[in-house]
Image: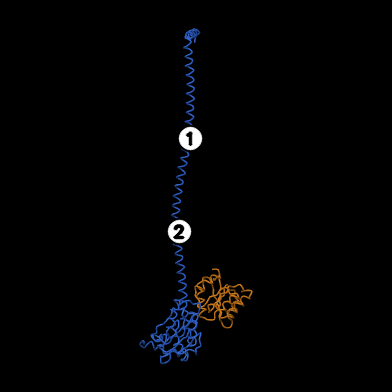
Chain colours: A orange, B blue
């Protein structure tokens, strides 16, 4: 039985799999995958998550819009959000942080870095 | 005593000369006085001795207490010494444990990194071969370069029919139409295509171009280079090539061509069954060199 649930939002199946592999290293965490922002909102509507890890650049609904929607939702407004950005220092990251993201990770992602951030936010 | 006797004695006393009587009385008095004096002296000395005895007893008691106290101190000192030894041992043990913990933590980080690297390679390999569409293979190749390697500007060249030049197949960060074919043996990329030996530069400060890329990796089919992946620049947050990047280059170099060949053959075949026809026949033929 998992103690924490995490929603991974990433359009690239490769990156999603890499993130799932990384998160699987953390005990007692269950991971749900979403392909884009809309898919994520659909899953958020049915489940309460302890953490959301989302890419920024995605089709249909990108990560920035997703962060905004999550923060304006009464149920999920306090859920910690980690954003994944491709660029090292772009305004996308700043915008996401301004919208309420809690942390960011830049690509190419490193599993130890992802694990450390998740543990930090979940206070593990 | 009878009256007669008393009378005889009184008679005799009265017969003693007065001088002698006086002398005797004086002597007796002196004797008595001396006796009193002696008694007093003896009593005084007795008292002094008694006091000295008391003092000596007190001193003995004090010395005994002192000795007992010294023994206690000696015991305490011994105890302190043994505790100090124990403490030093514990400190040594603690230092050893800290060192062990540090080593374990370092090892843990290394293991996590190794797992991540293996996951990268597994994902790269499985995704590369997960499709039989040429477009899909190229898409995965691009994704691998972007997402796993962190390539920003790059191009994938594939050799043309006669094997003298390689045409750009896909790229990012530049327009495909802006890229020229690479002539075998010309320039860094052409040289890599000729030799089949990758060139991966560690000189990040100089940056790279598609003509002189940071990494030029040959796409191999057995011992023959059939194309090149040229990575001109990487994302700015990437500070150096990681160990897994070199492994990814090896994997891409050896798997990209087979994935492309399979996809290309499949595209020309009319479905999976046609593509698979004759497979068993190849097993009965002698292995090709």
Q: Are marks 1 and 2 on the same chain?
A: yes
Label 1 is found on which chain of the structure? B
In the displayed orientation, state which residue is furthest to the front.
B206
Q: Closest to the observer: B281 or B239?
A: B239
Image quarter (top left, top right, bottom left or bottom right) of the N terminus of chain A: bottom right
Mark 1 to mark 2 CA distance (whole Å): 52 Å
Label 2 is found on which chain of the structure? B
The image position of residue A64, as x and y in percent, is 59, 79
Q: How many marks?
A: 2
Q: Residues within 10 Å of mark 2 (few under 14, many from 20)?
A: few
Labelled pair 1, 2 in contact (Cβ < 8 Å)? no
Q: Residues within 10 Å of mark 1 (few under 14, many from 20)?
A: few
Q: Which mark is residue B284?
A: none
Question: Is B100 located above or below residue B287 in the figure?
Answer: above
Helix, strand or loop status at disc 2: helix
The image position of residue A74, as x and y in percent, is 64, 74
Image quarter (top left, top right, bottom left or bottom right) of the C terminus of chain A: bottom right
Which of marks 2 and 1 precedes in the sequence? 1
Residue wearing tag 2: B91
Q: Which mark is residue B55?
A: 1
- Residue A78 lies in quadrant: bottom right
Q: Which residue: 58% across, 76% down?
A: A94
The image position of residue A86, as x and y in percent, is 53, 79
Helix, strand or loop status at disc 1: helix
The image position of residue B208, as x and y in percent, is 46, 82
Query: Of tags 1 and 2, which is closer to the observer?
Result: 1
């Amino acid at each position: 039985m998992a103690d924490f649930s995490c929603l991974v939002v990433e359009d690239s199946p490769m990156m999603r799999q890499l993130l799932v592999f990384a998160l699987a290293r953390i005990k007692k965490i269950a991971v749900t995958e979403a392909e884009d922002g809309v898919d994520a909102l659909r899953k958020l509507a049915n489940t309460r998550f302890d953490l959301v890890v989302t890419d920024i650049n995605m089709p249909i609904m990108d990560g920035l819009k997703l962060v905004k929607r999550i923060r304006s939702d009464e149920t999920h407004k306090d859920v910690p959000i980690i954003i994944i950005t491709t660029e090292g220092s772009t305004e996308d990251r700043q915008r996401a942080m301004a919208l309420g993201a809690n942390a960011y990770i830049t690509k190419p992602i490193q599993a130890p870095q992802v694990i450390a951030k998740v543990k930090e936010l979940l206070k593990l | 005593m009878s009256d007669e006797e008393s009378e005889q004695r009184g008679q005799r006393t009265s017969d003693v000369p007065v001088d002698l009587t006086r002398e005797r009385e004086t002597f007796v008095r002196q004797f008595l006085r001396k006796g009193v004096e002696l008694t007093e002296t003896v009593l005084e000395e007795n008292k002094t001795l008694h006091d000295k005895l008391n003092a000596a007893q007190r001193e003995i008691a004090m010395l005994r207490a002192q000795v007992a106290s010294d023994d206690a101190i000696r015991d305490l000192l011994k105890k302190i010494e043994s505790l100090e030894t124990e403490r030093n041992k514990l400190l040594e043990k603690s230092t050893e444990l800290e060192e062990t913990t540090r080593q374990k933590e370092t090892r843990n980080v290394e293991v996590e990194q190794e797992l991540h690297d293996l996951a990268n390679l597994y994902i790269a390999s499985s995704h590369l071969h997960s499709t039989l569409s040429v477009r899909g293979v190229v898409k995965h190749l691009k994704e691998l370069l972007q997402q796993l390697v962190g390539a920003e500007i790059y191009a994938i060249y594939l050799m043309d029919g006669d094997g003298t030049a390689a045409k750009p197949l896909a790229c990012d960060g530049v327009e495909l139409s802006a890229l020229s074919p690479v002539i075998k043996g010309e320039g860094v990329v052409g040289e890599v295509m000729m030799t089949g030996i990758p060139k991966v530069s560690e000189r990040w400060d100089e940056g790279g171009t598609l003509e002189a890329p940071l990494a030029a990796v040959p796409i191999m089919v057995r011992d023959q280079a059939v194309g090149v992946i040229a990575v001109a620049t990487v994302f700015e947050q990437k500070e150096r090539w990681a160990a897994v990047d070199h492994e990814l280059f090896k994997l891409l170099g050896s798997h990209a061509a087979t994935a492309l060949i399979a996809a290309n053959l499949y595209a020309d075949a009319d479905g999976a069954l046609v593509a698979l026809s004759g497979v068993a026949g190849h097993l009965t033929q002698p292995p090709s060199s």
